[in-house]
Image: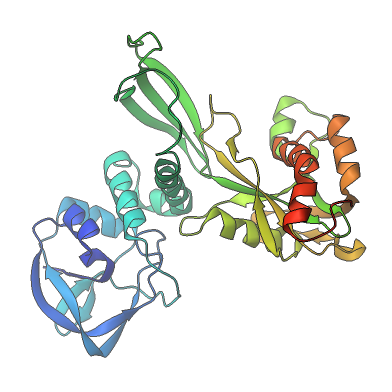
Amino acid sequence: MPVLTGPLGDPLLRERLAPQATATAPLNGRLVGGALAGIAAEGFPAFLPGGSELPAWETPWTPDLSRYAEIFALVPRQLDGREVLGIGDDRGEGAWQPQLAAAIADWLLTRQQDRSAADIRRCLPLIAGWIASRLRAGIETEDLPRLGPDGEERVRLTGWSEPYADHFSVESLVLRQRRHRGDWSPDMLRAIFVSGDATVVLPWDPVRDHVLLIDQFRPGPVARGDRQPWFYETVAGRVDAGETPEQAALREAIEETGITLDRLIPGPHHYSSPGAMAEFLYLYVGIADLPDDAAGFGGLASEDEDIRSHVVPRVELTRMAMAGEIRNGPLLSLALWLEIGAARIRAELGLPVAG
């Protein structure tokens, strides 16, 4: 029988994967790394022998434990004559997130039964980012002012499937909603485009009053027949599982433009198209030093990104927005939001209000 340790010994995962597990003699050693255990396929911690006692639990193989180990390519390691499960080779730093790992495990074992383990493993970054988005949404919206019909139960999910899953996914939902007058709707079929949350940041130099824009090719307009599929945009990217929207904004600014942001000013966070998309956008203005030579080329070759950046006066961005020349929604929102709030932000930064 395998012996569980490390993240698999945490109650949130152990009770989900192996509820019959019982405590057994500890292992002689300690774990390092493992911040992405249960989140990324190669995220389980490394084992260092000696030095301390590491708690362990013995369990028979359950169907859920076998399926989980197959998805994450977890193979028992031989330690002191025992088969130990929950050890990998990751030595990276960072805090492990047991709630996220447990939510991912539950999603994989209840919603992904018909997919091959190899296919799920390939899509783990998408799945983990999506589950992190769901957890974040529950926390951030718990205390929002109540809108809609009365009653505690207002939505019933009666059917779920995933007809497409790759870099993004499409979820097919069958649901009922409580109507404003108090009765219930019939079953409604809705297809939802799922991509996880994204962060969007407009770099702004409040001293020079310049902003940094990027332009890149977009396939969506091509599908629509658009003759101009290159867009002025902001720096943007997905919020990876295990990071905050703010961390994603700082990372994307470096990856796409090479610019280091000094501070993030939260802007108008929002859903881009809530009728059909689950994507939530975190919008920021990023305070940065933007000399004229800050413009250039960027993007990750591994993601086939071909990005060019431009430094323009903020007043020109406002003109472009008002003239209908900005066709990217998040950039348009930030351009107009910054036009209204620039004086306030300058005052908060201790800079002259008149730019």
**Residue at screen point 61% across, 33% down:** 272
How is colour applied across the structure in the image?
rainbow
Observer-nearest residue: 146 or 123? 146
Residue 39: horizontal and vertical position, in percent?
Answer: 39, 58
Residue 247: horizontal and vertical position, in percent?
Answer: 57, 60
Residue 121: horizontal and vertical position, in percent?
Answer: 40, 54
**Residue at screen point 76% across, 26% down:** 225
Q: In this picture, is 242 found above or below 83?
A: above
Q: Is residue 299 visible to us here?
A: no
Query: Residue 307 vs residue 140: left or right?
Result: right
**Residue at screen point 26% across, 71% down:** 6
Observer-nearest residue: 123 or 342? 342
Instruction: Quadrant for the N terminus, please.
Output: bottom left
Q: Is residue 70 visible to us here?
A: yes
Q: In this picture, is 125 found above or below 107?
A: below
Q: Quadrant of residue 346?
A: bottom right
Count of labels in the image: 0
Observer-nearest residue: 116 or 28? 28
Q: Quadrant of residue 55?
A: bottom left
**Residue at screen point 90% across, 44% down:** 315
Query: Residue 206 vs residue 135: left or right?
Result: right
Query: Residue 233 vs residue 157: left or right?
Result: right
Q: In this picture, is 3 found above or below 288?
A: below
Residue 216: horizontal and vertical position, in percent?
Answer: 78, 46
Observer-nearest residue: 207 or 243? 207
